[in-house]
Image: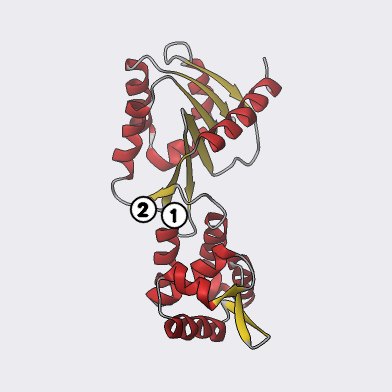
Amino acid sequence: MNVREYMRKSLEHFGLTEGEAAVYCAILQSGSGVCVEQIKQEAKLSTSGAYKIANALAEKGFVVPVKKSGSTSFTAVTLDKAAQKLAAKGRKFMRMSEKFHELQTLATVTEDTDVYEGNDLTDYYLSIPHQINDFIWCVGSFEAVMNFFGSEVERDFIRSRVRKGMSADAVIFDDSLFSKELVGRDVGEKRETRLIPHSTYPRGFSYLFGNTCLDFYKDAENQVKVLKTESPDLARSRLIQYQTLWNSTAK
């Protein structure tokens, strides 16, 4: 689902109504000092409905109202700040705090981003090689790949890529046994791998091919998520980053 829809549904899960989640996201994405007319347009509400929901969010501490010259505007309290308040309440609220941190990160990504999760994630992962038309970059923790999907699924992924004749460059931020074995298979699997050993590795990984950027991570509930963004600008930016990283690890 689209990242904005994912955010709204997540906020509903933690106690906001459907209207409150929509209005909060509209204010969060519109910046500070958002007027009711703008909220009304973004959330597709009547003027009275926009006022009512915005004031309800203010009572719950999600937005801050500012009255000036007879009118009221609203600024969203960032989810990072909400997370800090929740964390201060103790372990009971820690999971919600972690979830709010994740949502704050998602609030900064492009609206063209989709979120994939759930039982069909393995099927989606195995469909990726069939979307590649030339070359794929793999950056992050290979041990995370193993933890997320397992060795058999990853072997199927690689076999599909190799059958299509698609090559890969991989920058791996761990020196686990899995990763060292991967390097040993580079020639047969049409790949060149560079290892950057770390005692603690990033709990995620990213793929880049064409204009497609895929980011894999685990959320606060230990569920694997994939963010997919189709963006020429983002892809170019990532390509420059990955090439720079690759050159800095030249053998």
Label 1, residues with CA under 10 Å away: few <14, some 14-19, many ≥20: many
Left or right of residue 9: residue 39: right
Q: Quadrant of the C terminus?
A: top right
Q: Residue at x 61, y 72 (%)?
A: 77
**Relative vertical location of residue 165 with respect to residue 23 in this rendering, above or below:** above
9 relative to 240, above or below: below
Residue 1 marker: 2
Which residue appears farthest toward the front when viewing the image? 69
Say which of 37 and 172 sits in front: 37
- Left or right position of 182 against 76: left
Residue 225 in view of the camera:
no
- Residue that numbered label 1 is attached to: 3
Q: Whole-percent x and y of residue 198?
A: 65, 35
Q: Position of residue 8 (x, y in %)?
A: 42, 66
Q: Nearer the viewer, residue 162 or 67?
A: 67
Three-letter code for the amino acid on which mark 2 is drawn: Met
Tell me whether circle 1 and circle 2 mark residues in contact (CB < 8 Å).
yes
Count of numbered marks: 2
Task: List x then y, in percent, for residue 131.
Answer: 35, 29
Residue drawn at x 51%, y 81% as measured from the top left:
54
Q: Is residue 105 visible?
A: yes
In which quadrant of the rendered view does residue 171 lie? Answer: top right
